[in-house]
Amino acid sequence: MAKRAALDAMVPMSKTPPERIYLSTPHLGELEHGYVAEAFATNWVAPLGPHVDAFEAEFCATVGASHALALSSGTAALHLALILAGVGPGDEVLVSTLTFVASVNPIVYLGAKPVFVDSERGSWNMDPALFCEALHSRARGGRLPKAVVLVHLYGQSADIDPIQAACDRYGVALIEDAAEALGASYKGRSPGTFGQSGIYSFNGNKIITTSGGGMLVSEDAALIAHGRKLATQARDDAAHYQHSEIGYNYRLSNVCAGIGRGQLAVLAERVDARRRNFEFYREALGDLPGLSFMPEASWGRHTRWLTCLSLEEQAFGASREQVRLAMVEQNIEARPVWKPMHLQPVFAGCESVGGAVAEDLFERGLCLPSGSLLNAGELERVVEVVRRVCPNCP
């Protein structure tokens, strides 16, 4: 109670609640409207159509992939990627622990076992040294995992090269979860295009959106062709309805693909806007004691899909949770960094390789409003709350 009273004194409530500031909102333009109108005018509203074909081709050109499959969600894309990698009941799949649950759920759908790998502090992504050690240990014990799901977190690529090299050495399928990292780079290439397959998300809070949707990419034409069949209820090539394997209803609609085409055309602008948000926060808050931002790794460009910071409570004078609650009181949405998967009740009993770094980032990490529609006044409101909560603020 004493802490809450002190917080109230530091950040007084407005008599009239100010307008809501959201974490990450969709940002649509006229081009999307035109494509959607075209879909309606031509009666192409089914899952399939010319916008779907064009979206897949344009996405390949954007990220540098050879083949792409537009789907109803990033989760659907990951589910298919795991199936196409041969993952089945009892198999182990190594996966980043600091991520959203959608990176792990499809592993469990297939009856496989997730094994969680800790982060390294330079990028907040999977620690290559821990991963390689875990893979070598499993190879010596004769129990290699079937696949690895490498997550690229908050708009930043993981360090792919050492992880890919270890996967290639032992014949383990590398699946990249680039749901949060469209527009980022790793040594001049797009994350998501290095492994056997890569997945992307177009959920409403992502850097571009189709309202809901995802993409599976690969250099393997046969893999994408098989994924396309599975995503369309696995219908065999016959005049009648015949099915030789279990399929799914995972295709993206032509209407949503039209939105995606318009969004993809302004991807670079959306990345630039979010990076400007980060620079605003960095300049306004970078002098505060005990406050640091998610670093940008040396190997590529961070999109700053979300601006994330971490707080040392003793130096800053307040905890991450006190800052978040102060935001709530001022009608500003801010969220803790992802709670690591090895701490989630639903995955109790699953094996974890390390975990201390991810746990620390969760305890101290906060995601600030980062949408490309934010204006200077809204950014200033966020900064004002952070600075007011900091009793040690210069």
Image: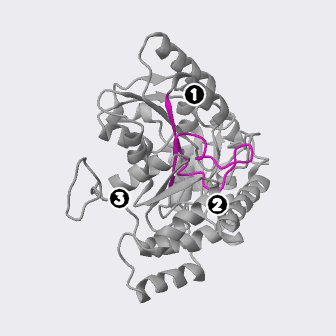
CB of mark 2 within 8 Å of CB of mark 3?
Answer: no
Q: Residue furthest top?
A: 140
Query: What amino acid type should be assigned to the residue bearing mark 1?
Result: Asp
Rendering coords of residue 236 (x, y %): 27, 55
Q: Residue at x 45, y 24 (%)?
A: 352
User: Few, some or many C-alpha atoms within 10 Å of disc 2 (few <14, some 14-19, many ≥20)?
Assistant: some
Rendering coords of residue 43 (x, y %): 38, 85
What's the CA distance linking mark 2 and mark 1? 26 Å
Q: Quadrant of residue 254?
A: bottom left
Q: Residue at x 47, y 75 (%)?
A: 50
What's the CA distance linking mark 1 and mark 3? 29 Å
Query: What amino acid type should be assigned to the residue bearing mark 3?
Result: Tyr
Q: Is residue 204 left or right of residue 383?
A: left
Regarding mark 1 in the picture, which secondary structure is present there?
helix
Query: What amino acid type should be assigned to the residue bearing mark 2?
Result: Thr
**Which is nearer the N-term, disc 2 or disc 3?**
2
Number of the label disc, if any, that sits on residue 250: 3
**Which is nearer the N-term, disc 1 or disc 3?**
1
Q: Is residue 205 left or right of residue 58?
A: left
Residue identifier under label 2: 62
Rendering coords of residue 356 (x, y %): 55, 26
Q: Nearer the viewer, residue 292 or 171?
A: 171
Q: Is residue 15 magenta?
A: no
Q: Residue at x 42, y 57 (%)?
A: 73
User: Is residue 262 positioned above or below 361 on the image?
Assistant: below
What's the colour scheme? one colour
Please indicate, yes or no, whether residue 26 appears anywhere in the rendered image: no
Magenta segment: 172-200
User: Few, some or many C-alpha atoms within 10 Å of disc 3 (few <14, some 14-19, many ≥20)?
Assistant: many
Q: Is residue 194 magenta?
A: yes
Residue identifier under label 1: 168
Q: Give the main secondary structure, helix, strand or loop, of the magenta stretch.
A: loop
